[in-house]
Amino acid sequence: MLRRVGGFAVLAAFLLAWGAADAATPKRAAFRVTLTGTLTKDWTVRRTVSAECDEVTTTTGRWKLTVATRRPSAIVIVRPAPGRPLRFSPGLVRSIAGSASQTGSVRKVTQGPRCERVVRSSNCATQRASFRGATTRLTSPVRGKVRLTRLQGASTVRSFSGNCPEEPADIRSLKTDLDLADAPLSVADVFDRSVPRFFIAGDSVLETTIEEEYDGKAVERVRWRLTFTRLAV
């Protein structure tokens, strides 16, 4: 049984330059946009095999992905109707490269009333993968908030062996991705032409517990940052 018990999100937006607001109200704003981010999934699970001697296997694992754009993407933001979220035309962030690793350890304890207690521990070999040319898309699910879609073109970082560290199907099904973290973005920031550059950042943590054959939990954390450099339009 898999149960997501919640988490927290930290949203941030920062202006890197300030000035008096322009009296004009532009309908469109164009930017060069770059992305950086770090995504992690940490899990600890325990499986018990009961017999004359019980064998308890505890596995810890960590999957980590770092991403960054290799060159900026041109994105136009369109002023929305009153009360509506921002529109991106286009909203595609391109040329994303990333590298991932998976590590872990296994501890097996054999024990029982008639058994000698034996403990065996081992570290798993580090697995690595990388990609280039991935994309994500900027969306605005509600006014004042921005979300990135799941990475496209990054499937190689999902193909690690699940044998060591052991990764139960419920944990493996958690595809930690950029869309777990949102960030704020206001209309005022976007269309204030006296601000040449600003960035927004999303930071989210989600904990999932599993039960039955395995007992344990996984903790996903997603942190990303988008930097907007204004272009003349």
Image: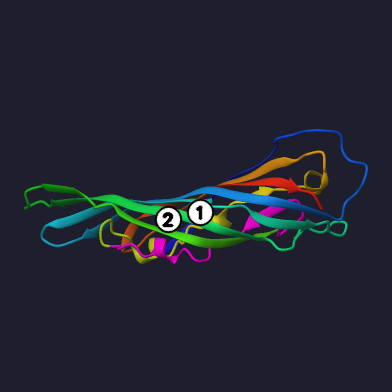
Q: Which amino acid does label 1 sit on?
A: Val
Does the magenta run of residues contain 144? Answer: yes
How many numbered tags mark residues here? 2
- Residue drawn at (40%, 60%), measured in percent from left and top? 157
Q: Is residue 93 left or right of residue 222?
A: right
Q: Is residue 79 left or right of residue 31?
A: right
Residue 60 in view here: no
Is label 2 in contact with label 1 (beta carbons under 8 Å)? yes
Q: Whole-Å distance between the Cαs marked 2 and 1? A: 7 Å
| Residue that sits furthest to the right in the current view | 23
Q: Mark 2 points at which residue?
A: 209
Residue 16 at what x, y percent from top left?
A: 70, 35
Residue 138 at what x, y percent from top left?
A: 66, 59
Residue 93 at what x, y percent from top left?
A: 61, 58
Magenta-tinted stretch: 140-162
**Crowding near pointer 2: few (<14 within 10 Å), some, many (20+)?**
many
In the image, residue 216 above or below residue 203: below
**Crowding near pointer 1: few (<14 within 10 Å), some, many (20+)?**
few
As drawn, the label of residue 133 is none
- Residue drawn at (85%, 56%), measured in percent from left and top? 83
Q: Name the residue under label 1.
A: 5
Q: Is the magenta stretch mostly helix, strand or loop?
A: loop
Residue 17 at what x, y percent from top left?
A: 74, 34
